[in-house]
Image (cartoon, coloured by chain):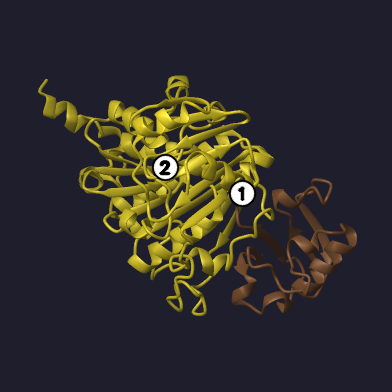
Chain colours: A brown, B yellow
Amino acid sequence: MAVTVLIPAPLRRFTNEQASVQVEAGTVSEALAKLDAQFPGIRDRICEPDGRLRRFVSVFVNGRDVRSLEGLDTPLREGDEVGIIPAMAGGR
Amino acid sequence: MSSSLVVSQRYHRQELIPEIGREGQRRLREARVCIIGIGALGTHVADQLARAGAGFLRLVDRDVPELTNLQRQVLFDEADVESATPKAIAAARRLGAINHEVELEPVVDDVNPYNVERLISDVDVVIDGSDNFELRYLLNDASVKLGRPWIYGGVIATHGTTMTIIPGETPCLRCVFPEPPPPGAAPTCDTAGVLGPAVAVIGALQAVEAIKLLTGNRDARSRWLTSFDVWTHELVRIDLPARNPECPTCGLGRYEFLDRTLPTQTIQLCGRDAVQVVVHPRASLSFPALAERLSRSGEVSYNRYLMRFRAGAYELTIFPDGRAIVRGTTDPAEARSIYARYIGM
């Protein structure tokens, strides 16, 4: 299944500044693994060492938070968009 | 032309917007808003809400403007930096000159679990103008507990994120981001920089959300977590998830950030090359007496609001309640010992 992973600005230093990356994956977890194979280190910014989603990052499939779906096991279909949003600091 | 006519015409252009009208403007005139943090986002939102005719603005900030703030913090000028006028005071002065109809309450203080509920309990909307997650999660706890809507905003470099939280109706910050990032895990304006127009865009989005909530247009509120990059025009707009029944804050009613009891003394990093020291319970310092004591060890000056003390590589900004910002170090232990050496604890 070809899906698109949207890369947030703070993580683009891993992806040569690419804003989106196409990968073949059947679940969110697999998509992140494929992403990490292509751009080593990026997965650690999204997941804890034990594989769970980091608690200050939200991952969305077609605009829906995976925490309200099946988490990182959420299945993906052809053309799905996986979005990653880290909590944003700053403001002063 | 009578002065009342001038007043009534003042908001004419925004009253023409059908969603606001005379009735919306009347509601705005009665609205009370607390802005937590009068920095980049805070000054933008305060400027917009004062011009729009919000009835009451409480402006809370612990700090004084610095030269590096002027690039993005729109209510301050070089004279405010020179005179070390606290941000809350300087902003209130400027806003009062912009619109004398707005009641302004500057509060020069650190926001912490002891005072946050008092600061927001009597307002209709709370604006997040802070720059750190510790404070945002505290604000989230207090807002959910007291049922006060708050509008999150965060900006780094050229992009920012915003979200409107209405307790009981929308998910809260912890539903979307269950925990704050650990120190060092998220970039800050001090490390990644920040562009003024990026702040202006997110601040404007926060101000619009406040105006909607305060003019009876709650149904029109944003239902998204919105991120925008002003450099690339990339817009990411995510449907907010349903409220999480397992959310510690709004699902289970556990206010972990609010209930966190502070030690008698807290020390935290405070921007670049500075550490804040806060003592509990609050002290009541006499500046003339302290100045006399400190003048033997370094250069001292003070005004109504704060004292500046320079000794060697350190500069201390000391507030009447004992709080101090120690510049010249990022080491909490060093800041503590400097505080203990000169002010005592």
**Point 28% across, 50% down: residue:** B215
| x, y percent for residue B328 | 62, 35
Mark 1 or 2, closer to the camera: 1
| Residue holding disc 1 | B332
Distance CA(mark 1)–CA(mark 2): 21 Å
Residue A34, quarter of the rendered image: bottom right
Circle on res. B296:
none
Q: Which residue is located at x 50 percent, y 61 percent? A: B137
Camera-nearest residue between B186 and B230: B186
Question: In the rendered structure, which amino acid carries the disc numbered 2?
Answer: Asp
**Which of these two is toward me, B191 or B13?**
B191
Crowd rating for badge 2 (residues with CA inside 10 Å; few <14, some 14–19, many 20+): many
Q: Amino acid at mark 1?
A: Pro
Label 1 marks a residue whose chain is B
Query: Which residue corresponds to the image point at 46% horizontal and 38% vertical from the top-left?
Result: B63
Determine whether B14 is above or below B134 in the image.
Answer: above
- Asked whether the viewer can see residue B275, the reply is yes
* CB contact under 8 Å: marks 1 and 2: no
List x then y, in percent, for residue A13: 80, 47
Quarter of the N terminus of chain B within the rendering: top left
Pointer 2 residue: B61
| Direction from residue A13 to residue B3 in the image, left or right | left
Q: Residue at x 81, y 72 (%)?
A: A30
Is label 1 in a helix, a strand or a loop?
Answer: helix
- Give above or below for B78 relative to A53: above
First along the sequence among labels 1 and 2: 2
In the displayed orientation, state which residue is furthest to the left.
Answer: B2
Kindly identify which chain the residue marked by label 2 belongs to.
B
- Name, please, the residue furthest toward the right: A37
> Secondary structure under badge 2?
strand
Does residue B332 appear to the left or right of B262 in the view shown? right
